[in-house]
Image: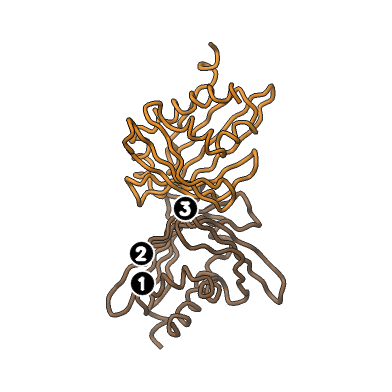
Chain colours: A orange, B brown
Amino acid sequence: MTTTTRNETTIEADPDLPTIRITREFDAPAAKVFRAYTDPELYAKWIGPRSVTTEIQDWNASTGGNYRFTNSRNGEVLASFYGSFHEVRDGERLVQTFTYDGYPDGVSLETMTFEDLGDGRSRVVGLSVVDTMEARDAMIASGMETGVVEGYQKLDELLTDL
Amino acid sequence: MTTTTRNETTIEADPDLPTIRITREFDAPAAKVFRAYTDPELYAKWIGPRSVTTEIQDWNASTGGNYRFTNSRNGEVLASFYGSFHEVRDGERLVQTFTYDGYPDGVSLETMTFEDLGDGRSRVVGLSVVDTMEARDAMIASGMETGVVEGYQKLDELLTDL
């Protein structure tokens, strides 16, 4: 199956800025991927690692809206996450804040851009910024990679059914 | 009058990070300053330079809420600004996003912390982060200093009446 080899997830920590850039291509048009980021039922199906279940508590994916969701395993809530939708620019761009409630003073600002590549394919670039290099390095060290990579694999599967 | 000399506004652009730190002390307790940041009628009275009038369009100063306001001069709208309240931690901390709609792709994440200093005085530290050094330098070059300094002078005056 060529999908898993050509749709690699790239996670880059900038050497000079407190940012993380995540780049991923999909075998689906940008509008469809955007829908999977903004529809709560779809989002809950793909976000995060395979080992947890996501439940949406709050969700208003419009400019000025907000969200909150939990991750559970065997019925036990492991973590919850919340933030705001600073901007929802249909099919093109999402700007969100993000906090993991186990570290309530940590906030990242995340900008996702969605770009059609032709032939029904698209690219999503997610840029996260925090206010210190230490906070950025802690995000990398938290094991986020597994959640990102597995989440996007689940999203590949979901997109084939949409 | 000693107030204006001892309550100086400090604006610092970090040499290594895309951040701006604004520090200001007030002759009022943190709870009162916090109220002036979260009550829309009070906020409209002090935010920004003296040459403009602020009108609040949207305002929900709670975690997950959002805001939008305009600056006008002689009845003409010069600019509008919007963002989200990522977190409102009563009397202590505000985390907001901020966009000037003349530059719609520019977003800053702003964390204000409110600290009592005793004797009825307090300090507010505002830390803004964006995702490139160029965007940070553009914020400094935009003439923000006048608005910040004059706004805090208006806030001094407002706090004496609260």
Q: Is residue A127 left or right of residue B32?
A: right
In the image, which is nearer the foreground, mark 2 or mark 3? 2
Q: Is residue A74 left or right of residue B56?
A: left
Q: Which residue is mark 2?
A: B92
Res. A80 image quadrant: top left
Asked whether B27 or A100 is in front, the reply is A100
Kindly indicate whether the residue at mark 1 contacts the one at mark 2 (C-beta within 8 angstroms): yes
Across and down, in percent, residue A126 comes to: 52, 37
Kindly indicate whether the residue at mark 1 contacts the one at mark 3 (C-beta within 8 angstroms): no
Badge 1: how crowded within 10 Å, few (<14), some, or many (20+)? many
Q: Is residue A137 left or right of residue A154?
A: left
Lower sequence index among marks 2 and 3? 2
Q: Which residue is mark 1?
A: B30
Chain at tag 1: B
**SS at badge 1:** helix
Lower sequence index among marks 3 and 1? 1
Q: Residue at x 49, y 27 (%)?
A: A152
Q: Which residue is mark 3?
A: B129
CA–CA distance in space, label 2 to label 3: 19 Å
